[in-house]
Image (cartoon, grey):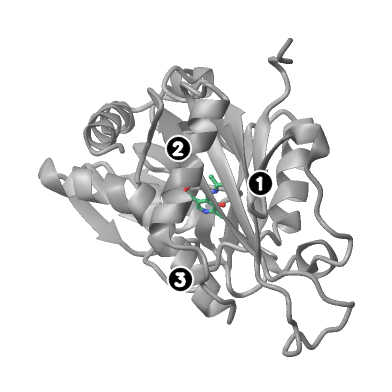
Amino acid sequence: MKDLTMRTVYVNGVYLPEDQAQISIFDRAVLFADAVYEVTAVVDRKLLDFKGHMARLKRSLNEMDMDDVYSHDDLLSIHRALIEKNDLDEGVIYLQVTRGVADRDFDFSQIESTPGLFLFTQAKNLVKNSLAARGQNISLVEDQRWGRSDIKTVQLLFSSLSKTRAKKNGADDVWLYRGDEITEGSSNNAYIVTENDEIITRELSTDILHGITRNSVLNVARLHQMKVIERAFTIDELKSAKEAFSTSASGFVNPVVTVDGVPIGSGEPGTISKSLRQTYLQASLENAI
Ligand code: PDD
């Protein structure tokens, strides 16, 4: 009988039960975090913003001097096969491309293997998200990540450690700052809404990940005649904002209700954040593939 808790995953050309999937200890992903990844949301068995995720994957590979050997169509087929094989109604698909296998050496110019590829599914409730309904409690941490946060590498230890420590202290997540300005969240982009209903989020640079959800949400906001300003905002602006929210592929638009214990606005999920969540979802479901 089929074990329903056992997922089917994809590793380097084959579909396998998750407990049989393996990669080499010499894979550079293991030894150097030398790999890039994408996370794409699935709702009603369809992929949200898939084109955007694949375009960003291409960019990450390029910035890492990695070969782009997997085509958009092949990757789409693998995503769709995993949805079928795992009967995935709602959740995410994680994809990782590793530089490949080579004996340990900081210089990778002599690598001969082709890039590694693996994907797996995670079933999750994304649309009915209790955190989005309640609103997130955020704590602030100095951004000590490397200077190329725009590349979606698997080198995520700083954010992972910071989030775990913050959760131990009762928060839901961390937002990071450099100087007195917010960069982004541990795994999401960060926004405030001012008293004049302007939406402010940091401009694209090497300081932040160029969120695919960010791009879609800003498009939707502009389409609905909302004023969007792409610039850094300070910690003081955040604490005195009318609303704050984050965006990511798995969290969509996720309201923030406190920052380091200070209530944002009324201390409840804000009206604009809630309506952007609805309009973003509606628009991306219409374009889902
Ligand atoms: N994280 N900023 C960081 C540092 C991220 O890791 C992510 C995504 C985002 C939002 O990007 P997008 O809208 O394309 O998901 C911003 C994913 C979801 C993760 O690591 O699980």
Q: Nearer the viewer, residue 70 or 213?
A: 70
- Mark 3 vs mark 1: which is more N-terminal? 1
Q: Looking at the picture, how far across and down is residue 146, in whole percent?
A: 67, 71
Query: Alpha carbon of mark 3 to alpha carbon of mark 1: how far?
Result: 26 Å
Q: Tell me the residue at 21%/50% (across/down).
A: 219
Quadrant where the C terminus lies? top left
Instruction: Between label 1 and label 2, give the one nearer the viewer.
Output: 1
Q: Nearer the viewer, residue 269 or 276?
A: 276
Q: Looking at the picture, how far across and down is residue 109, in whole percent?
A: 72, 89
Instruction: State whether residue 87 is above or below residue 40.
Output: above
Q: Tell me the residue at 49%/27% (across/down).
A: 84
Query: Alpha carbon of mark 3 to alpha carbon of mark 2: how far?
Result: 22 Å
Instruction: Between label 3 and label 1, give the one nearer the viewer.
Output: 1
Can residue 158 be spotted in the picture? yes
Instruction: Between label 3 and label 2, give the one nearer the viewer.
Output: 2
Amino acid type, callout 3: Arg
Secondary structure of the residue carrying numbered label 3: helix
Numbered circle sitting on residue 59:
3
| Residue labelled with disc 2 | 80
Instruction: State whether residue 152 is above or below residue 105.
Output: above
Discs 1, 2 touching: Cβ within 8 Å = no
Secondary structure of the residue carrying numbered label 2: helix
Residue 254 placement, left or right of 86: left
